[in-house]
């Protein structure tokens, strides 16, 4: 998807001092533009945190009936310096990209798109879709990998039983001995978990990694903190085990990874290392540069999504946490 904010602000992201316990991040509501705008609940980037591992963008949306939102129709738009991870709980979205990638994204199937040096893609919900419900996640590419060629990886993640009343699908990384074949450039974990009412599970985790739970449905206790729908609960590196409990049936996403050490600047659909680089990426897209390539197969009328205007004046870096 495209970050559809009309006036996206530039966000400078960097590491922060670790906190004790669970950092609970509330989502903010972001309309994605258009007359019948889809709304998303965004928990990363957050004014109090930029990353969980290399995960740097978490948009959660739906369930939205298509009759209300008009569905998803995102014309060709660019990305650079990142990978996108698309995961649906309901509905179907047809994807075309400038690397020749064409896939119908379905629930239970992960699509990881490497933007690297530059890619363009379009996303349109299919005619048979009545409800859209899912997440759009971004992973920052580290300095050494940020100019990778464009690529699309697709994987139908089988459901696996992890414990009594706990089922998972592993999008990326490894959980409970189940490893996804999807390749990432930094150590990363992403998994959907379905918990039955009364389920309690101790999750063995890499103590060098930070972890978060995004609640899609139900309520859970995560490392002792109560989380409701839309909230992201983050635990910094340190513990070797985390506890996940559900009093009612719940569905969550578990995200984790090695703390990301680099400073980045995110604006619109780009990740750069400084303001000038983001300006150059925007100008390249506006000029129709081959850097992003051409999308073939988008059925809509608009051939490409123009970039928004960049905010004026001197951009103030946004602190990852107040006081840091
Ligand atoms: Mn996109």
Image: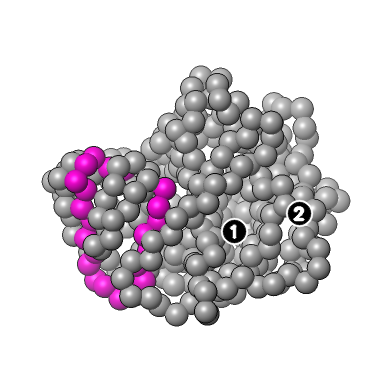
46 relative position to 32: left or right? left
Answer whether residue 249 is visible to the viewer in this image: yes
16 on left or right of 124: left
Alpha-carbon distance for marks 2 and 1?
14 Å
Image position of 240 with respect to 197: above or below: below
Q: Position of residue 45 (x, y in %)?
A: 54, 60
Q: Which residues are magenta?
A: 230-251
Q: Identify the residue shown where x is 41% and y is 70%.
A: 258
Nearest to the observer: residue 5 or residue 133: 5
* Residue 161 rendering spot, x and y as whole percentages: 20, 45
> Residue at position x 80%, y 53% from top?
309
Q: Is residue 45 magenta?
A: no
Q: Is residue 232 magenta?
A: yes
**Residue under circle 2?**
291
Q: Which quadrant of the figure has residue 173? A: bottom left
The colour scheme of the drawn protein is one colour
Q: Which residue is labeled 1 in the image?
A: 82
């Amino acid at each position: 998807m495209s970050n559809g904010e009309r006036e996206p602000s530039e966000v400078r992201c960097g590491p922060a001092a670790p906190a004790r316990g669970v950092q609970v991040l509330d989502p903010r509501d972001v309309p994605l533009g258009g007359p019948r705008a889809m709304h998303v609940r965004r928990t990363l980037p957050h004014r109090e945190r930029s990353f969980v591992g290399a995960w740097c963008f978490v948009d959660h949306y739906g369930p939205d009936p298509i009759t209300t939102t008009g569905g998803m129709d995102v014309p060709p738009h660019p990305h650079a310096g990142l990978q996108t991870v698309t995961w649906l709980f309901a509905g179907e979205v047809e994807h075309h990209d400038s690397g020749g990638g064409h896939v119908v994204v379905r629930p239970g199937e992960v699509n990881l798109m490497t933007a690297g040096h530059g890619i363009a893609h379009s996303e349109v919900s299919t005619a048979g879709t009545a409800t859209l419900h899912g997440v759009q996640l971004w992973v920052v590419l580290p300095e050494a990998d940020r100019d990778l060629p464009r690529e699309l990886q697709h994987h139908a993640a089988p459901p696996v039983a992890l414990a009594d009343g706990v089922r998972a699908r592993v999008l990326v990384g490894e959980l409970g001995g189940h490893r996804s074949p999807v390749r990432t450039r930094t150590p990363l974990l992403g998994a959907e978990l379905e918990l039955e009412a009364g389920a309690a599970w101790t999750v063995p985790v890499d103590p060098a990694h930070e972890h978060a739970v995004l609640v899609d449905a139900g309520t859970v206790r995560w490392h002792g903190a109560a989380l409701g729908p839309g909230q992201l609960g983050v635990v910094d590196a340190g513990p070797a085990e985390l506890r996940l409990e559900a009093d009612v049936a719940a569905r969550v996403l578990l995200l984790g990874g090695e703390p990301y050490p680099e400073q980045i600047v995110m604006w619109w659909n780009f990740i750069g290392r400084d303001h000038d680089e983001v300006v150059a990426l925007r100008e390249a897209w506006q000029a129709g540069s081959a850097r992003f390539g051409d999308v073939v197969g988008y059925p809509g009328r608009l051939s490409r999504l123009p970039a928004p205007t960049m905010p004026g004046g001197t951009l103030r870096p946004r602190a990852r946490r107040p006081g840091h």
